[in-house]
Amino acid sequence: MHENRIYSISEAKKAALRQYPEFAWTLIPAIESGWKFVPPAARGFDDLRGFRLWNDDWADAVRIRSDRDVYGLRIDPDAMRVWYREGTLTEVMRGLLELPPPHDPRAPRLVIGHAPRPIPRVAQWPRAPWR
């Protein structure tokens, strides 16, 4: 029923808070800064996944399995990893939220590896109505 649905801010807040109520202060600022979260039931995942698309085809993404098993990354337009962190929800989300925008001279740009598969090139991601 919700196979390709990306949740609105209010629905995403509710879903994130249901699963991780103690981290509202980390997830809610992410949502308010342009992150979109897809609750597990919407895509058949065992985890909560989120992403932020940048206008220049860069993307930030996060996979949250538990409050202590989180993986975050930034990928370039060719789906190459330029930044990543594994750790707690607080550590990873704080790192992602502190990253400068991709066009900023201080932003990471050096390719450090492939993004985990399957992540298509950002240009192939469905465009959402907020863009």
Image: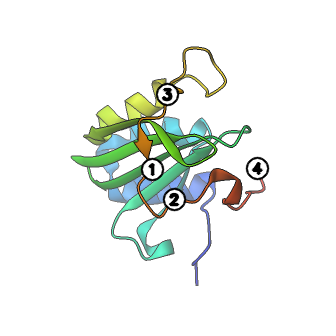
**Which residue is at the front of the view, 46 or 17?**
46
Dot 1 or dot 3, earlier in sequence: 3
- In this image, 124 relative to 28: left or right? right
Q: Position of residue 64 (x, y in %)?
A: 34, 53
Q: Which residue is mark 3?
A: 110
Q: CA distance from mark 2 to mark 3?
A: 19 Å
Dot 4 or dot 3, earlier in sequence: 3
Q: Secondary structure at mark 2?
A: loop
Q: CA distance from mark 4 to mark 2?
A: 21 Å
Q: CA distance from mark 1 to mark 3?
A: 13 Å
Q: Secondary structure at mark 4?
A: loop
Q: Secondary structure at mark 3?
A: loop
Residue at 60%, 47% (x, y): give it.
78
Q: How many marks?
A: 4
**Amino acid identity at mark 1:** Ala
**Which residue is at the front of the view, 5 or 54?**
54
For marks 1 and 4, give the one nearer the viewer: 1
Q: Position of residue 74 (x, y in %)?
A: 50, 39
Q: Residues within 10 Å of mark 1 (few under 14, many from 20)?
A: many
**Amino acid identity at mark 3:** Leu
For marks 4 and 3, give the one nearer the viewer: 3
**Amino acid identity at mark 2:** Ile
Residue 105 to residue 131: above or below? above
- In this image, 12 relative to 70: left or right? right
Q: Which residue is mark 1?
A: 115
Q: Position of residue 45 (x, y in %)?
A: 39, 71
Q: Residues within 10 Å of mark 4 (few under 14, many from 20)?
A: few
**Amino acid identity at mark 4:** Trp
* Tag shown at residue 130: 4
Q: Residue furthest top?
A: 105
Pointer 2 with pointer 1, Cβ within 8 A? yes
